[in-house]
Image: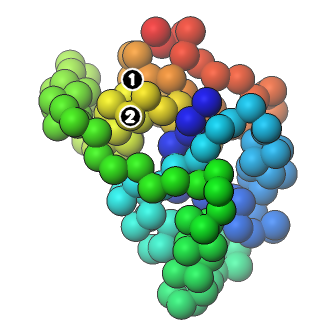
């Protein structure tokens, strides 16, 4: 299994006082996951938000954020995922669907990215459930870790 992690998962992993750290740590220990990936938008989001006091209980300096990001990339289980072919077509289809909410542009991009890369998207954000065909793992503090691919496929 290859996973594309949403920014909220990366943030929860780096701060033990983060409200979702225990769930993120449990996910991280899942040996069935072959790789975990950053893409440009999740990397940028991690760098931006990890140094923001309103997003992370213990914000990092920009320099510290870069160090941790590069440490993640140095791990054998972490990979850099390039944009898949046909990303724009899938992204367009998701954002032009009836009822699309403007606040979901980044979510739609990540959903299209994961779909085109054959990755499972992992997030604490339940809004991803709305994207049909997305293999999505919704991390919550109250539910067991399970993929929703069968719900959306």
Rendered view: 56 above or below 9: below
Could you tell whether 12 is left or right of 144 in the image?
left
* Percent of width and height locating residue 52: 53, 78
Alpha-carbon neighbours of circle 1 within 10 Å: few (<14), some, or many (≥20)? Answer: some
- Whether residue 65 is visible to the viewer of this picture, yes or no, is no
Residue beneath label 2, please?
A: 117
Rendered view: 76 above or below 68: above
Alpha-carbon neighbours of circle 2 within 10 Å: few (<14), some, or many (≥20)? Answer: some
**Disc 1 from disc 2: Cα separation:** 15 Å
Write the residue at 56% across / 39% down.
Answer: 3
- Whether residue 64 is visible to the viewer of this picture, yes or no, is yes
Quadrant of the image containing the N terminus: top right
Choose mark 1 or mark 2, whichever is in front. 2
Write the residue at 50% across / 66% down.
Answer: 46
Mark 1 residue element: loop
Labelled disc at residue 131: 1
Mark 2 residue element: helix
Q: Quadrant of residue 90?
A: top left
Labelled disc at residue 37: none
Q: Quadrant of residue 56?
A: bottom right
């Amino acid at each position: 299994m290859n996973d594309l992690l949403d920014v909220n998962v990366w943030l929860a992993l780096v701060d033990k006082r983060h409200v979702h750290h225990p769930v993120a740590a449990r996910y991280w220990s899942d040996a069935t996951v072959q790789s975990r990936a950053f893409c440009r938008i999740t990397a940028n989001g991690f760098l931006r938000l990890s140094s923001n006091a309103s997003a992370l209980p213990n914000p990092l300096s920009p320099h510290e954020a870069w160090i941790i990001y590069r440490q993640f990339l140095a791990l054998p289980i972490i990979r850099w995922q390039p944009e898949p072919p046909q990303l724009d077509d899938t992204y367009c289809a998701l954002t032009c669907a009836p009822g699309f909410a403007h606040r979901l542009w980044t979510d739609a991009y990540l959903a299209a990215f994961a779909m085109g890369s054959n990755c499972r998207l992992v997030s604490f954000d339940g809004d991803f459930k709305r994207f049909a065909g997305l293999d999505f793992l919704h991390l919550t503090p109250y539910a067991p870790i399970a993929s929703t691919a069968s719900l959306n496929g």
